[in-house]
């Protein structure tokens, strides 16, 4: 029988350098520029790596996210879209 305590044990928090923020954007998008500024600040403060992807260069991203641009993923999971809240992103990366 499995040890039940391991099922309820909280996952160990990842260190900042083990996290990844992804900004999915498109060219000429002012909301994307605003989102990128927030991501650069928060990730820079915390030492979290981030990447930028364009829906113009990836048909799958285009099909999945074109109505929500900009989209922010944290560790591959959708965190937010349209507007990025600095405090909310910081909390997601430090909890």
Image (cartoon, rainbow, N blue to C red):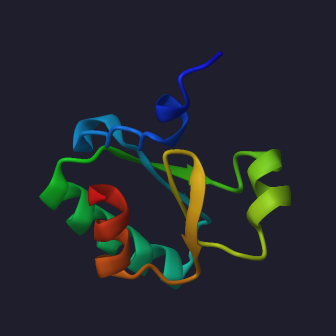
The quadrant the C terminus occupies is bottom left
In terms of depth relative to the viewer, which is nearer, 76 or 13?
Answer: 13
Residue located at (32% from left, 35% from top): 18
User: 87 or 59: which is nearer to us?
Assistant: 87
Q: Position of residue 89 (x, y in %)?
A: 36, 69
From the viewer's perspective, tell me whether residue 74 is left or right of residue 89.
right
88 displayed left or right of 42: right
Q: Residue at x 65, y 15 (%)?
A: 1
**Residue 5: percent from left, percent from top:** 47, 33
95 and 65: which is toward the camera: 95
Q: Is residue 69 left or right of residue 37?
A: right
Residue found at the far left of this picture? 45
Percent x, y of residue 39 = 33, 65
- Going 71% across and 55% down the picture, which residue do you hit? 56
Q: In the picture, residue 71 is in which quadrant?
A: bottom right
Q: Farthest residue in the right direction?
A: 63
Let me know if residue 95 appears in the view. Answer: yes
Q: Up-down: is 82 above or below 14?
A: below
Q: Which residue is painted at 56% across and 78% down in the image?
A: 29
């Amino acid at each position: 029988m499995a040890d039940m305590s391991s099922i309820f044990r909280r996952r160990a928090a990842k260190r900042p350098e083990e996290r990844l923020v992804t900004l999915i954007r498109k060219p000429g998008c002012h909301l994307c520029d605003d989102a990128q500024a927030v991501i650069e600040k928060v990730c820079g403060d915390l030492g979290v790596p981030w990447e930028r992807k364009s829906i113009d260069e990836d048909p799958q991203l285009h099909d999945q996210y074109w109505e929500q641009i900009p989209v922010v993923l944290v560790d591959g999971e959708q965190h937010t879209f349209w507007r990025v809240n600095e405090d909310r992103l910081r909390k997601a990366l430090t909890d």
